Amino acid sequence: MKIKTIVMGAAGRDFHVFNTYFRDNDMYDVVAFTATQIPNIEGRKYPVVLAGKLYPDGIPIYPEEALPSLIKEHDVRQVIFAYSDIAHVDIMHKASTVLATGADFRLMGPQNTSIKSSKPVISICAVRTGVGKSQTTRAVCKILQQMGKKVVAIRHPMPYGDLSQQICQRFASYEDLNLHKCTIEEREEYEPHIDNGIIVYAGVDYEVILREAEKEADIIIWDGGNNDFPFYHADLHIVLADPLRPSHEILYHPGETNIKMADVIIINKIDSANASDVNVVRENIEKANPNALVIEAASPISIEQPEMIKGKRVLVIEDGPTLTHGGMKFGAGFVAAKKFGAKEIVDAKPYAVGSIMGTYEKYPHLNVILPAMGYGDQQMKELEATINNSDCDVVLSGTPIDITRIINPNKPVVRVRYELQEIGKPDLKTVLEKFQ
């Protein structure tokens, strides 16, 4: 008899695990996906075009809260955990819930889920969301471009719309972002690459995506999401650690996996972290992966119009996932407000509406700062309303995008920019030259 299975996910690795291991595997019957972390991704179906011939009706996606009742209803024998940025203790609470029903609880590793490319692959991953993958990926791409290589970035999935229309997406221009109706989170990852002349692929079926990207690349960059490990076999695995969250590199899944797999580990934010916390990270790396090459780096911030911040009442917007399931209380926007002399950082909570208010309720560690939530048109409108309701002089945006392209603030917006700055040797250029 087929083993009835549920895959727990967040519209990312869960679909990839299904595609690579379960889709055409007649030993299993995947009766459902469950979804969490991201709003409004449950209630859909994994469509027939992606589910394959064994699932002519597709596969339903339910909220994770329904997991125990789904196990009982379908006599499920196995639950696959397939999402990231979760504390070890929390994943074991979920495992205990599953085991208490009688079902098995399973994690799947790279051997069963990673795809081999015909081109060299450099993966850039992290121990937590919000460590600095994006600026590191940009730095790696720039070095490789200067070496004369044609680089294509493949971004970890963010398929929050019509899955059947997101099988394989290619982004080379802002028009492509509009064509694919990208969310704020997607734009935060794609826009900087487009600005630097890098083509980006993403979507749902990462075998199809890889084969398309290989046609126009000398080197593939795996641009990781959250703290997930790569979907592809990496020839060079670069991982970022965060001394602002010391010991998270050994306390979160699958960030610890990344640390133990890494060829190169970058300790970022050296400039803003306490020396004692940096040492904690160094010691944990030495214990977990003494063979890794360690690079130290900072992510200095800059703004084009500092005079618009000094002495002003400022509303700070930060990258959404960094603040929500990433667990950070602030980001580059907050640091910039302090650095450039803001008179006051205005508390956004009293002005929040709709799902933005709900975000503060779901993540009680958030204080003052406004997360740039934009998972769909309605939430973007609610973000815009929250900004426009706020009693402030200026909006300081710590997200990697120009938010005025997608919303219409009634106040001036100043962007914060940040790039990776390596400190001393070894550095990425040395690593990449040897990789050649």
Image: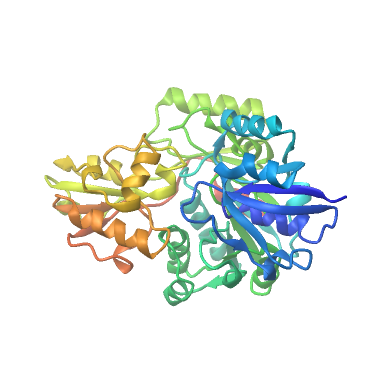
Quarter of the image for residue 368 reads top left
93 or 272, which is in the foreground?
93
Q: Position of residue 263 (x, y in %)?
A: 66, 42
Left or right of 317 in this view: 25? right
What sort of colour scheme is used for the picture?
A: rainbow
Name, please, the residue furthest toward the left: 311
| Residue 234 appears anywhere in the view | no
Q: Position of residue 248 (x, y in %)?
A: 53, 31
Left or right of 97 in this view: 318? left
Query: In the picture shown, does residue 396 fall above or below 171?
Result: above
Numbered label tally: 0
Q: Position of residue 132 (x, y in %)?
A: 47, 46
357 or 183, which is in the foreground?
357
Name, please, the residue furthest toward the right: 1
269 or 244, which is in the foreground?
244
Left or right of 64 in this view: 76? right
Q: Position of residue 112 (x, y in %)?
A: 78, 50
189 or 182, which is in the foreground?
182
Quadrant of the drawing holding the C terminus: bottom right
Quarter of the image for residue 282 reads top right
Which residue is located at x 46 percent, y 32 percent? 243
| Residue 79 appears anywhere in the view | yes
Which residue is located at x 55 percent, y 37 percent? 86
Left or right of 345 in this view: 261? right
